[in-house]
Each structure stands twice: as C-alpha cells, then as structure tokens.
Image: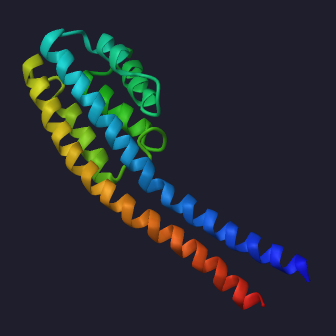
Amino acid sequence: MPGKGIYCALIVAGCALLGRLLSRKYRNRTRRLQQLSDRFAHMGSLFAYDAPVLDELMDRVAGNDELTPFLRAFQEALRAPENGVRDAWQNAVTRQESGALAALTTDDRQLIRGFGELLEQVDRLGLRGHCQLIRERLEGQLTQAQAEQLKYEKLYGTLGILGGCLIVVLLL
C-alpha cells in the first residue's frame, strides 16, 4: 500500500526536522558570540579614537541584527535619570536574557555583565583595554561554541533521523 510509505517518510522527515531544530541553539550561540565580539571590537576602536558619549556610542554600534534590542535597551536605561551607567548595563543584560541574549550560556552572560562593572570606574583608554579583553574572552568562548556546534548539529541531526527510523520500525 503506497500510503504507508508516505507516512513512514513523513515520520522520518519530521523527526529529522526536530533534530535540526534542537541543534539550532548551538548555531545561534555561535552567531551571537561572533556579533558580540565584533561589537566589542568596534566599541574599543571608538573609545580609542573618537571618545563618544555612551548614548552616542550605542547609536553607532547598535547595527541592525539580533543584538540591536540589547544595545537599544542599554541606551534606554542610560536615559533614565535614576540609573547609573553600571545599573543601566546590568538592567539591559537582565531584560534581554530571554531576548537577544537568550542563545548565550550563563558563563557568556556573566562575561557580558562584567563589562558593566567597569563602565563607571575607568577612563576611555581603560574601557578600550577592557573591550579588547572581553573580545579575547569572547573569542575563546566562540571557539568552544563552534566546536560544540559542529559536534551537536551532527549528533542531533543523526539522532532525529535514527529516531524517525526507529518509530517507523516500531509502527510496522
């Protein structure tokens, strides 16, 4: 009966798709870490050569991708008179933990939070050095994330297909 083969193919395809969806978080983490690394490099160069006000700096660095809501949240928090720079950064990180920063691990977010601790305490050149340090640490996290992505994308893809085949065998 040809209908049975179509159902089996749909089950295998559905399970394979589920495996791909589960592996997406690893790809998203890699992408976010790369974007953050690029943003910190940009901020570091702006601190070194241009010395803009933080509000203006966020306009220049924000871009138009998945991290934009996080940087805009920081910009909005900066404008609130009751917030200091450090508190504004921490509020932005907290508000975006389920948004732009959701793909990151706890260690990644702690690294990003650490940048806010020094925002009020050091001068522009100190911020430049701190941006470079954060970027180097993000690059380390990025290398680890890329290795995990390679490993787990294949794993979840294969498990999805094998799981679909197992369901088909059990149903026959």
Front residue (pair 49, 94): 49
Residue at point 64% right, 85% down?
A: 166
| Residue at horizontal 68 percent and vertical 73 percent from the top | 12
Residue 87 higher or lower than 78, as above or below: below
Residue farthest front in this picture:
2
Q: Residue lying farthest right?
A: 1
Give the x, y percent position of residue 75.
37, 19
Residue 169 versus residue 122 in the image, above or below: below
Whether residue 103 is visible here, answered yes or no, is: no
Q: Please say which color scheme the image uses.
A: rainbow
Is residue 111 visible from the viewing direction of this image? Answer: yes
Query: Picture coordinates of residue 7 (x, y %)?
Result: 81, 74
Position of 121 relative to 96 (above/below): above
Quarter the N terminus occupies? bottom right
Q: Is residue 92 above or below residue 47?
A: below
How many numbered marks, from 0 up?
A: 0
Q: Give percent across and percent down for residue 21.
A: 57, 58
Q: Quadrant of residue 41?
A: top left
Residue at point 39%, 39% (across, down) = 94
Q: Quadrant of the C terminus?
A: bottom right
Relative to 162, 89 lies left or right = left
Image coordinates of residue 170 in percent, x first then y, are 71, 90
The residue shown at (58%, 72%) is 160
Answer with the quarter of the image where residue 138 lies. top left
Picture quadrant where residue 101 is located: top left
